[in-house]
Each structure stands twice: as structure tokens, then as C-alpha cells.
Amino acid sequence: MDDSCQEKIQKYEEFVDRRLKPDLVRAIAERDKVFEQQKVFSDLRRNIENLEKNSVTSLKTMVNLGSEVYLQAEVPDTRRIFVDIGLGFHVEFTWSEALNFITQREEKIKRQIEEYTQLIASIKAQIKLVLEGIRELLELPAEKSLPQHIF
Amino acid sequence: MEDAKKGTVTSLASIFPAEEAQKAAKRVEDTIAEKEKELDRLRGFIADNNNLINLVQKLPEELHHDIMVPFGKAAFFPGRLIHTNEFLVLLGEGYYAERTSKQTTEILKRRGKSLDSQINSLEAIIEDHKAEASFFSATASEAAEGLVEIREDYEEENSGKGEFKSGILTDADKVKATADDEEFARMMSRLDELEKEELAAESGNHSDENEETTSDFDEISYQKPIDINLQNSEDTQQRITLEQINDKSIATEFPGECSYQEDISDQLNFASLALQSQTREGKSLAKNLKNLDATSEKSTTHLEEKMVQPTTASKSVVIQHQPSQPLFDRQKASTSSIVEHAGYAQRNSKEKNSTSSQVGCRTSEPSFDSSKAFTGSILEHAGNLQTREKNSTSSQVTGSQPSKPVSRFRMQRR
């Protein structure tokens, strides 16, 4: 009984440590990436709105060549903008078109974030469940909250 | 270790189990992999850097280049690079410098050099780790093969002369060293305290010269170090005579020499402390003289009592010295008398012990006649150090310590 119990506990723990936790870490990393995208697009929207508000048609900017070396660049016509639509494609938009695209893109990103949040929550729930199972096998009292140290 | 057998036989597997050794090897290999990753990253940096150097060199060849100007991370504008010979380079901490193409290239090359050195050091580390890993795996395989380690104690065969050396000298030195270590630790803490007090007193002097409390405190606190110093110097005196007896037989290589020299340096600290403390008293005396209080008398008696304690001759020294250096005011004379006393005592010990090699040839006032042994020993160490240890301690103590209070007096007098 004891041996089989120990074995089971070990199996569960291994499942938590080798499967669930890496999954969780991965999911969180993915969600962070999407968050970053969200930020990129919200920045872009703000910038375009700024251009629109100030009706800027040409601008000068500094281009990063890498290793924090900058060079001046000028844009003669800002009304046409090329926006990354994914998979390496860039589409030429006018400002209003770009803003429209960004809105749609942001909605999609929001949905993605929600998905990932769901996924993360479910992984956490699974971890908790397995740990509860281990607790039951060890016959520890419930208030001694073992899973506390995990997250 | 057993008495019957002359050594022990341990199988390597019992000390380093094969699995453990393999685990260690694996861990080291993991570290190597990690370092390799870092190395790759650095190589990537270098490649980027080289590309950038090429780009920076090429850009000024034309007046402008048509590019897609990035606008945020997800958008571009069609545009062009202008002012192709004006680069803005990050120097760090948010500071940028405007450089030409050539200058930028130089900066980037320097960066590349530092990256190269980083890569070199990383490669050296990886080599080390590889050696370690191979050692571990070798140990693992040896343990698996059942290698044994035989350990046998080495016994000295001829114990005639060696016994004599280690028996008398090193034992004595050991005892001395432990005693002195304790003493030294205590003295060092004391010294630190005194340093603080000195600083406090100094700042006090600048702000308020009439401050009486600090000087009184000094007098009290310096009483103890002198007494300790007395003991120590007596001890060393004995030991030195012992050493000199042995020096006749074993002139060149002296087994306890290392520890002896350490002791000497310790002793020197005490000696310097004694000097310092006495000069400090002189300083407090100076203050009192300035105040022209009744306390000046008290302080004088304090000083003279203390001078009597370390040496019976010191009082006469003070008196003798005063006429000889009439330009100095009184407290300075007492200070210098102590300093001079060092040289004098050296001379004295030189005559007594007839060890010319140990005694430094400091310029001494030849007008004194006799002294007690321990005073001689205090200052003899100063001489010893001068000849034997030409390091910073000796110069600090013999040179700066006695002269420092004097300059302070000068400062005070202004």
C-alpha cells in the first residue's frame, strides 16, 4: 500500500513538474508575446492619430542601424504607410485604412489574449487538482495548503 | 588510520561513487553547454558589429539612400537616408555623440575588441570546464573499474637537527604567534578606535581648540596600549635573544623566520602605537599649555608618569633633549624625543645584541647613555623592519607616523 502510494505520488509530482509547469511557462510566454504585439499596434495607432491631428505630410526621423547607431532619414510623404499584416507581408495603407486595419487587428489580439488567459487558468487549475490529489494520498489536512509555493 | 598497518587503502569508489562522479560530470557539461550558448550569442554580436562597420563605411559613399523608414515596429514609410556622414552613436547611459563615418567605425572596432576579449575569456572558461568534465568522467570510470587509493604517512628518518629546529624554535614561535594574533587583533581594533578618536579630536581641534574632554579621553585610552606593548616587547626581546643564539648555528635558512617576521610587523604596530600614543599625549599637553589651565599641570604629570612607565630613561631623555633643540616648543620636543629615542634605542640594542644585520642604521642622537632593555626592543623592531621588510608598513611606521603628529602640531600652532 505504502509503496504503491509513494509511486503514485511520485508519478503525479512528475506530471506536475515535467508536463504542467513547462506548459504553463510556455503559455505565459506566448501570452506575453501577444501582449507585446498589442502594445506595438496601440503605439502605431497613437502615432498615426498624432500625424493625422497635426496633419504632418513629411517628417524627419532617426533610423537605428543597429548597435544604437543612428542616422537621419526623411520621409517626403507620410500619407502612405506600409503596415505589417503578418507572415512578412506589408500592405500600403492610407491613414484611415491603417487605422481601420489596426482596430481589427487589436480585436483579434484581444481575443488571442483571452484564449491564452483561459489556457493558463486551466493549466493552473490542473496543477492545483493534481496537488490536491497528492495531498489526499498523503492524507494531509486540507487547510495545510501545499500548492501555495507553486504560484 | 590504523596503527598496525602503515597506511590506508581506500577504494576510489567509496570516496567518489561512480554515479556521483558521473552526475558531477553531467553538471559540468551542462555548464559548458550554457557557456557555449553565451559564446554563440557573443559571436552573433560580433557578426552584427562587423556588418554594421561595413554599412557605416559604405553609407557616406552616396548622398542619400532610399530605404523603408521604420515607423514603430509594425509599420514603414518609404523614405530615404540623408546626411549620410553624420552618425549618432550611443556612448552609454543615454548619452549620444555625433560622429562621422570614420569615427563611428573606430568606436565600433573598439567595441568589437572588447567583444573579442569577452569571447577569449569565455573560451578559456569553457576549456577549464572541459578539463573539469574530463576529470570527472575519468574519475567515474576509474571508480567503476575499482581503483584503490593507498595512503601512507610520511615519517621523517633523520630527526636530529630538524628536531632541534622545530622543537625549540617553531614551538616557541607558534605559541608566540597565537598569542600575538590575539594581541594583534585586539590592538588593531584598538587602533581603529584610536583612529576614529583622532579624527574626532582633529575636527574638534579645528572647531573648538579649548575642548578638554577629547584630550582627557586620549590620555586614559592610551594608558592600556602602552602596558600591552610593554609585555609584548619583553616577550620579543626574549625571543630575539633566543633567535640570535640559534642564528649562530643556522645562519641562512631559519624555519620560523616567516612567522617571526610577521610577529615583528605586529610588534612594530605596537611600537608605533606607543609612539603615537606618546605623541598624542604631547598633543594634549600642547592644548593644555595653550589654555594655560591648571589642567596643564595635570597633563604634564600624566605624560611624565607614562613616560616613566615604559622606560626609566625617558624622563631624562626629555630633559636632555629640550636644551638640544631649543627651537621647538615643549610638546614638540617631547614628541621628537620619543622619535629620537627609537634611533637611540636601536643603537643601544645594537651594542647589546651585536646583531648588525637586524638593526637598522637610523640616524640617532649620540648624546644618550643608557636605556632599559624593553624600550630598546620596542624600537629595535622598527629597525628590524627597516632592514628586513622593506614594505609599506615599515615606511609608514618609521617615516610617517612620527612625523605626522609633528606636522599636526605645526598646523595647530598656526
Image (tube, coloured by chain):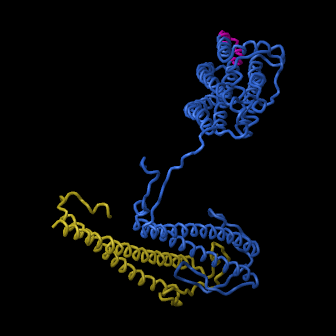
Chain colours: A yellow, B blue
Q: What residue is shown at x 50% (from left), y 73% (from top)?
A: B33
Question: In the image, residue B143 lies at what x, y percent?
Answer: 43, 67
Question: In the image, residue B310 lies at what x, y percent?
Answer: 66, 18
Does A141 appear above or below B371?
below
Q: What residue is shown at x 83% (from left), y 17% (from top)?
A: B367
Question: In the image, residue B352 lies at what x, y percent?
Answer: 75, 22
Does B326 appear above or below B103?
above
Instruction: Say whether residue B291 is magenta.
Output: yes
> Could you say which is closer to the camera, residue B272 or residue B414?
B272
Relative side of B296 to A35, left or right: right
Question: In the image, residue B77 lies at what x, y percent?
Answer: 59, 84
Q: Main secondary structure of the magenta part?
A: helix
Residue B188 seen in this snapshot = no
**Residue B314, image quadrant:** top right
**Residue B120, image quadrant:** bottom right
> Could you say which is closer to the camera, residue B104 or residue B48?
B48
Instruction: Say whether residue B305 is magenta.
Output: no
Part of the protein shown in magenta: B285-297
